[in-house]
Amino acid sequence: GIEFIDSYVFNKVEDIRFNSTVGRYVGYTEHGVKNAEAWNSDAGFLGQEQAELERVCKTGAAIDYSNILDKT
C-alpha cells in the first residue's frame, strides 16, 4: 500500500505529522499534541490531507507503474 506522511517541523524538531495509515495527525511536542487534537477535530484539515494522498501518491504510483510496464 501507499503511505502519505506530511510532517511539520519547527526549529529542526518534528512538531506534528499526518500519517495516512493512521488517518490522523499525531503530535510529538506539547505544541504539536495541542495542534493535533484541534486539527483532528476539523474535517476540513483531514480532508485536505486525504486529497493530497489521492493527488500526490496515487497519481504518482499509477504513472510509475505505467512506466514500469512500458519497459518490460
Image (cartoon, grey):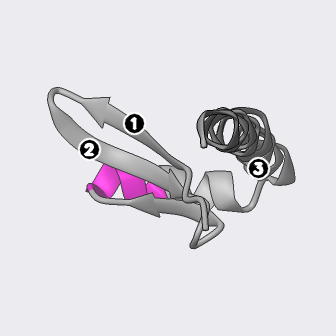
Whichever of labels 3 and 2 marks the residue nearer the N terminus, that label is 2
Looking at the picture, does residue 19 appear above or below residue 66? below
Q: Are marks 2 and 1 in contact (CB under 8 Å)?
A: yes
**Residue beneath the point at 71% across and 33% down:** 63
Whichever of labels 2 and 1 marks the residue nearer the N terminus, that label is 1
Q: Amino acid at mark 3?
A: Gln
Residue 59 point in image, percent of width and height: 76, 36
Dot 2 crowding, Cα within 10 Å, few <14, some 14–19, many 20+: some
User: Which circle, 3 or 2, is nearer the viewer?
Assistant: 3
Q: Amino acid at mark 2?
A: Glu
Tell which of 21 and 59 is nearer to you.
59
| Label 2 – label 1 distance at C-alpha | 6 Å
Q: Which mark is residue 50?
A: 3
Q: Which residues are magenta?
A: 29-34
**Residue indicated by mark 1:** 8
Dot 3 crowding, Cα within 10 Å, few <14, some 14–19, many 20+: some
Q: Amino acid at mark 1?
A: Tyr
Residue 33 belongs to magenta span: yes
Looking at the picture, does residue 21 appear above or below residue 20? below
Q: Secondary structure at mark 1?
A: strand
Q: Secondary structure at mark 3?
A: helix
Residue 66 point in image, percent of width and height: 73, 38
Secondary structure of the magenta portion, mostly?
helix
Q: Which mark is residue 14?
A: 2
Looking at the picture, does residue 21 appear above or below residue 32? below
Query: In which quadrant will I find the C terminus?
Result: top right
Left or right of 40 in this view: 10? left
